[in-house]
Amino acid sequence: MVERSVTVKNDDGIHCRPSSEIIATANQFSDCALRISTPKGESDLSSIMSLIVLGLAKGDSVTVRAEGPREAEACEKIASLFEFNFDFPDANQ
């Protein structure tokens, strides 16, 4: 098992759009068990609703845990999404 602690960076927290990105990435690692834990609760990243209901806000701490054949890669990719500042729509366009 691999784990990494991160801080939510997105200005609006982890709402529907960031959640969909996180779950889509988690689905790429179907050979790994992926979980997050926060002071607000836990999610196994199997569904978007299990993530959204946590109501994660900017500054919240999240521990990402991965177990499986590609656990290091999965943990790193999922953790990086919690640290990403999503901009919907892209303000640079």
Image: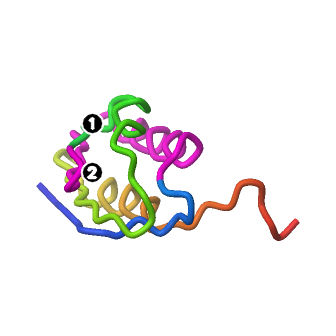
State whether residue 27 is above or below residue 84.
above
- Earlier-in-chain disc, 2 versus 1: 1
Q: Which mark is residue 70?
A: 2
Tags 2 and 1 touching, CB below 8 Å: yes
Q: Secondary structure at mark 2?
A: loop
User: Which residue is depicted at the point 16% across and 60% down?
Assistant: 2
Return the residue at label 1.
31
| Magenta segment | 14-41
What residue type is disc 1 on?
Asp
Tell me where residue 22 appears, x and y as whole percent: 46, 46
> Pointer 1: residues within 10 angstroms few (<14), some, or many (20+)?
some
Quadrant position of the N terminus in the picture: bottom left
Q: Is residue 93 above or below residue 44?
A: below
- Coloring applied to the structure: rainbow
Q: Is 72 part of what is drawn in magenta?
A: no
Amino acid carrying label 2: it is: Arg
Q: Position of residue 46 (x, y in %)?
A: 33, 30
Q: Position of residue 59 (x, y in %)?
A: 39, 70
Report how far apart the C-alphas of labels 2 and 1 lie in the structure: 7 Å
Residue at 32% in and 38% down:
45
